Amino acid sequence: MLPRLAGALAAALLLGTAASAEPNEGVAFAGGAAGDGLSGYAGLVHALPGAELGKGLAVRGSLSGGSYEYDSSGVRIDGRFEAAEAALVYQLSGRWGWANFSAGPRISDVSLSPRDPSNDRQGTRLDLAVQSDGALLLDSSWRLGWLGSLGVRDGTYYSRAEIGRIVEPRSQTRLGLEAGLQGDPNYRSSSLGLFAAAKLGPNLEGRVSAGASDQEGRHARPYATLGLSLLF
C-alpha cells in the first residue's frame, strides 16, 4: 500500500526545476498531502560542479513520512512509514521545456497495526528507484508536465500527467488538470483533480491541488496536496 505522498512529491518536482534566465545551483522543496492519510516530505536537488539547475548532472535527496489506512480482508489496517531516497539526476532544458532522468537507492520502513500477512512491504526494505520528470512548453501559456517513477525490486509505480495554462502572467499563476496512477503488485489507485500554482516570491513557487482518488475495493475519496519550491 502506498500513501498519497507520491502525488505531493510529484507536484513539488514539477515546480521550478527548469533552468531560469539566471543560472541556479539547486532547488529545495517541501510539502504534504491528505487523503488516505497524512504525509509530509522535504528534499533538495543540487547541480554538480560544472553543471547548473536544468543542465547537466545533479544529485537529489529527500526524506518523507506519514500515516495511512486501508482494508485487508475486511480488517482495517493502520500504517506508518518513513523513507529516504538519493539519486543521480541527468538534466536537459531549452525553449521547449525540461526533462530529468534519475536513478538511486530508496530505503523505507513500514509498520502496520495489526500486522497484515498479505502485505510484503512491511518492515525495512531497500530498493532501486528510477524516475523521469519534466514539462513541455506548448506555447506561451500552456504547459504539459509529467512524472513517472518505478521501484525496481518492490514493483511500486507512480505516473502523473498535468496540463495547465497561465492565467495571470505577472505572478505566473497556472490553473489546470492533473491525473495520476499508482500501485504495486497488490493494489492500483487512480486519481483526478485540479491544481493551481503561482510564484510567491522571486524564487519561490507554491502549488495546491485537490480531487478524488479511486481504488478497487473502496469508494472514491477526496485528496489534497500542497507543495513549495525554492530556487537558489
Image (tube, grey):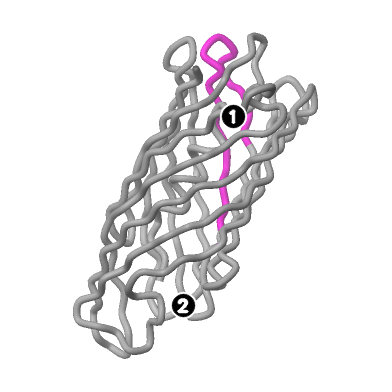
Which residue was labeled with disc 1?
17
Which residue was labeled with disc 2?
216
Quarter of the figure with residue 101: top right
Q: Is residue 85 left or right of residue 14?
A: left
Quarter of the figure with residue 125: bottom left
Q: Secondary structure at mark 2?
A: loop
For the residue pair 168 and 55, the one nearer the viewer reads as 55
Q: Is residue 216 left or right of residue 40?
A: right
CB atoms of marks 1 and 2 within 8 Å: no
Q: Secondary structure at mark 1?
A: loop
Q: Is residue 181 left or right of residue 211?
A: right
* Residue 213 is covered by the magenta coloring: no
Quick one: label 2, few (<14), some, or many (20+) residues within 10 Å?
A: few
| Residue 62 on image: x %, y % | 43, 44
Task: Name which residue type carries label 1.
Answer: Thr
| Residue 149 on image: x %, y % | 59, 56
Q: Is residue 118 left or right of residue 52?
A: left
Image: magenta residue range: 164-181
Write the residue at 30% across / 61% down. 81
Write the residue at 48% across / 32% down. 196
Above or below, comparing residue 226 to residue 154 in the picture: above
| Residue 231 on image: x %, y % | 50, 20
Quarter of the figure with residue 206: top left
In which quadrant of the rendered image does the N terminus lie? bottom left
Task: Name which residue type carries label 2.
Answer: Glu
Write the residue at 64% across / 16% down. 20
For the residue pair 210 and 80, the one nearer the viewer reads as 80
* Residue 179 is covered by the magenta coloring: yes
Label 1 to label 2: alpha-carbon separation: 34 Å
Q: Residue pushed farthest front? A: 49
Write the residue at 38% across / 62% down. 108
| Residue 105 on image: x %, y % | 52, 56
